[in-house]
Image (tube, rainbow, N blue to C red):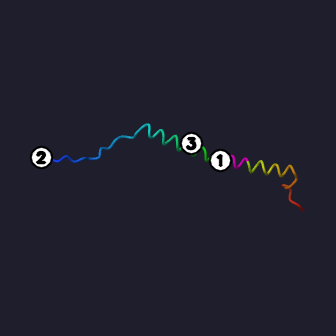
Amino acid sequence: MAAHKIAHATLKGPSVVKEICIGATLGLLAGGLWKMHHWNEQKKLRTFYDMLEKDQISVVVDE
């Protein structure tokens, strides 16, 4: 009788190029989110100081 060949899954090591691409993508994504957060905070501060300069708001409590 002829022996049947059984295909077994062979385990490979990590792909360096794939790991670099995934790492770079995740890094750019996280950096982009952080930058958007930073821009939003700057916008809030700029708006606050503009309103303060135009006397629309005050940081002194009215008595």
Q: Alpha-carbon distance for marks 3 and 2?
A: 55 Å
Question: What's the residue type where badge 3 is placed?
Answer: Leu
Q: Which quadrant would residue 32 be assigned to in this image?
A: top right
Q: What residue is disc 3 on?
A: 28
What residue is at 87 percent from the left and 51 percent from the top?
A: 54
Q: Alpha-carbon distance for marks 1 and 3?
A: 12 Å
Q: Is residue 58 left or right of residue 28?
A: right
Q: What residue is disc 2 on?
A: 2
Residue 36 - label:
1
The prevailing secondary structure element of the residues shown in magenta is helix
* First of labels 1, 3 by sequence position: 3
Over which residues does the magenta segment extend? 35-42
Regarding mark 2 in the picture, which secondary structure is present there?
loop
Percent across and percent down for residue 59 are: 84, 55
What residue is at 71 percent from the left and 49 percent from the top?
A: 41
Question: What's the residue type where badge 2 is placed?
Answer: Ala
Residue 4 - label:
none
